[in-house]
Amino acid sequence: MKHTMTHRAFFGLAIVSGFSLACGPPPEAQLPPEILVADPPPTAGGIAPGAGQQSFDRALAYLKRGAYAQALPELQETLRVQQTNAEAWYYMGLCQDQLGMRPQAAQSYERAIQLKPSLTEPRINLAAIYLEPPLQTARAIELLTAALKQQPKAPDIHENLGYAHGLNKDYARSADHYRQALALGPNPRVSLAYGDVLFAQRKFSEAATQYKVAFPSIKDQLDVVAQLAHRFGKAKAYADCVMAFDLLVAKRPSPKLHIHRGLCRHGLTDEAGARADYEEATRLDPTSQAAHYYLAMSYLGDGDRVEAAKHFEACMKLGADTPIGKKARRRYDGLVDGLKKRQKR
């Protein structure tokens, strides 16, 4: 599951350029007054100092309002005359990024970093671009690692590094960065991602702990809830498994959901609840082999061989050659053999 890991930074670094006018000597007292004209400002390559500053200031004002389309031409004008303005290149990248111009944004971020390596935000945003298709994971990790050296206590950088290493299936490094992010403050999104990494490492119990933390934040996302419900079951976190399936059954009841909740209830030794789920599954879909099989197993656990045999037989009739049909056959034959032996006694 892909959680939101990109970081779109905005910071107010405005460069204020100033210049001074060089004035001529004061007029001599005996001469008639003259209208003095200030000398033209010195130029660098034909461009007056401070040129482009008004455009830059207007761009910043637009950016503070989230008006990226309006800020973009102002930044283009700024960079026409301030080509080494690293902050302007960063903001240019930010505008292009927000407007969906990802290749151009990447170029602008790279230029900002080249001009001012101490800037952190363009590294983070550029890494976010490289962590989306077409992936450039190695470059993203390089950028984020450099950013982390400048901001070692930034949880979002740790989160993004966790995601990047996870893409490389380097689960140990990924988990380490997620742990460090969580040590800096709770975050359900990070807990969910950390749980996925732990699950990939087959650390099911630890994964369930993280999923439980994240659960309240995703309970409206039914597809994610369904995945967690099954993973809770895998981790034998049966109470959490039932909780998740309760939510799903309430929203969209189905035979499969009842069967899976029944299995989790069975794990909690709530056999009455489990059986109620299996029975509801057979009511919703009388052709469900799994529902008949698990209902038979429930009756068998209570020693009711007659009801167990009845549902094993129903399961076989629905498909004797399926894997679950073959399991039902073995159970059924064992029951019949047992009953015959009892009769002979």
Image (spheres, rainbow, N blue to C red):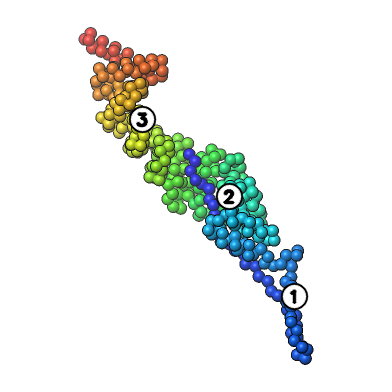
Residue at point 41%, 15% (across, down): 321
Q: Around disc 2, counting alpha carbons within 10 Å, would you say few (fewer than 14), some (14 to 19), or many (20 or more)?
A: few
Residue 238 drawn at (x, y percent): 34, 35
Seen from the viewer's position, the closer of residues 257 and 251 is 251
The answer to whether residue 325 is seen in the rendering is yes
Tell which circle, 2 or 3, labels the residue nearer the N-terminal end. 2
Residue at point 25%, 30% (across, down): 272
Residue at point 71%, 67% (across, down): 48
Q: Around disc 1, counting alpha carbons within 10 Å, would you say few (fewer than 14), some (14 to 19), or many (20 or more)?
A: few
Give the labeled residue for mark 1: 39
Give the labeled residue for mark 3: 254
Q: Secondary structure at mark 3?
A: loop
Q: Secondary structure at mark 2?
A: loop
Give the CA distance from mark 2 to mark 1. Answer: 43 Å
Q: Is residue 222 left or right of residue 28?
A: left
Q: Is residue 219 above or below residue 325?
A: below
Mark 1: which amino acid? Asp
Tell which circle, 1 or 3, labels the residue nearer the N-terminal end. 1
Q: Around disc 3, counting alpha carbons within 10 Å, would you say few (fewer than 14), some (14 to 19), or many (20 or more)?
A: some
Which residue is farthest top? 344
